[in-house]
Image (cartoon, rainbow, N blue to C red):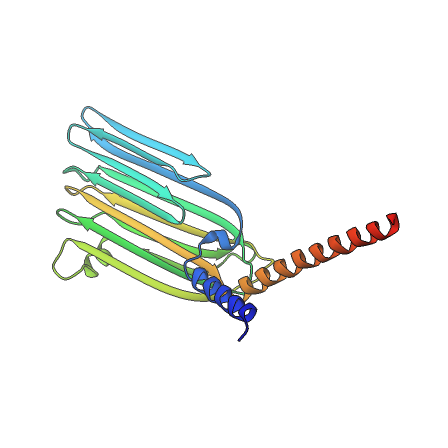
């Protein structure tokens, strides 16, 4: 194997390994909407927050009895609470609308919850929907019973993961939605993160195609320079 082929093999190997960790930046993202909100008792009144944006955001509120906080990140939603009342809660959601780059999408998610007394009242939800047909590719909601049933051994914590693959259409718009609700119960934290990527073959073809276009442009540019020089002579 000559040095050029070896370099090409190394580059392709690196690209394939990188795709495994790709995110929504690898699809044609149209829009994103982030929302965080929360509530805490503060007799005789209350404290609240509600924020929206097109980029990751965070919000919080507190009283002498506890507090709530929630935030979003790229492909992630999180919330924590502290206090002894059912009326302390924090929520976070994010919705992405995109066009796929290929006909296959790999989707994976990780959900976790930790609590001091109980996860009662806490839950999480997600879905992927074809907006052209209104058909759900995947939809799931895990309530506090689900969280409790999947706890790690005898600890006050739970982690749940999943992975699926779907056939999609490149001219259809799709929505990915993530949501968490963290309730108080003396302190609870809920997180949900996701990853969605096109098939590796699609990315490789796009990269190779881009490389060929750049090479062709460079070659054309060089030829035009030589012609110009010859004419001047």
177 and 200: which is toward the camera? 200
Residue drawn at 42 percent across, 35 percent down: 52
The percent coordinates of residue 153 (x first, y second) are: 14, 62
Q: Is residue 43 left or right of residue 141?
A: left
Residue drawn at 79 percent across, 54 percent down: 226
Q: Which of the 4 quarters of the picture holds residue 204?
A: bottom right
The percent coordinates of residue 199 (x first, y second) are: 50, 65
Residue drawn at 25 percent across, 39 percent down: 89
Image vertical order of residue 187 relative to residue 17, above or below: above
Q: Residue furthest top?
A: 44
Residue drawn at 40 percent across, 49 percent down: 75
The percent coordinates of residue 58 (x first, y second) are: 34, 36
Q: Is residue 213 left or right of residue 5?
A: right
208 and 104: which is toward the camera? 208
Image vertical order of residue 41 relative to residue 231, above or below: above
The percent coordinates of residue 29 (x first, y second) are: 52, 49
Image vertical order of residue 180 relative to residue 41, above or below: below
Is there any visible trace of residue 34 in the rendered image?
Answer: yes
Q: Residue furthest bottom?
A: 1
Is there any visible trace of residue 143 in the rendered image?
Answer: no
Q: Is residue 228 left or right of residue 152?
A: right
């Amino acid at each position: 194997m000559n040095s050029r082929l070896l370099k090409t093999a190394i580059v392709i190997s690196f690209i394939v390994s990188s795709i495994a960790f790709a995110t929504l930046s690898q699809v044609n993202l149209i829009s994103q909407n982030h929302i965080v909100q929360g509530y805490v008792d503060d007799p005789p009144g209350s404290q609240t927050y509600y924020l929206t944006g097109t980029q990751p955001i965070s919000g919080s509120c507190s009283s002498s009895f506890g507090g709530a906080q929630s935030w979003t990140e790229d492909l992630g939603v999180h919330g924590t609470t502290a206090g002894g009342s059912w009326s302390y809660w924090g929520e976070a959601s994010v919705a992405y609308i995109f066009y796929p780059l290929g006909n296959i999408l790999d989707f994976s998610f990780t959900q976790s919850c930790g609590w001091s007394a109980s996860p009662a009242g806490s839950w999480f939800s997600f879905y992927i929907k074809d907006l052209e047909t209104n058909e759900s590719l995947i939809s799931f909601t895990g309530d506090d019973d689900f969280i409790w049933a999947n706890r790690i051994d005898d600890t006050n914590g739970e982690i749940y993961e999943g992975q699926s693959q779907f056939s999609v259409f490149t001219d259809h718009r799709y929505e990915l939605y993530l949501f968490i609700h963290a309730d108080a119960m003396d302190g609870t934290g809920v997180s949900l993160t996701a990853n969605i990527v096109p098939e590796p073959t699609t990315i490789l073809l796009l990269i190779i195609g881009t490389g060929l276009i750049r090479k062709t442009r460079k070659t054309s540019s060089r030829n035009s320079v030589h012609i110009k020089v010859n004419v001047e002579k």
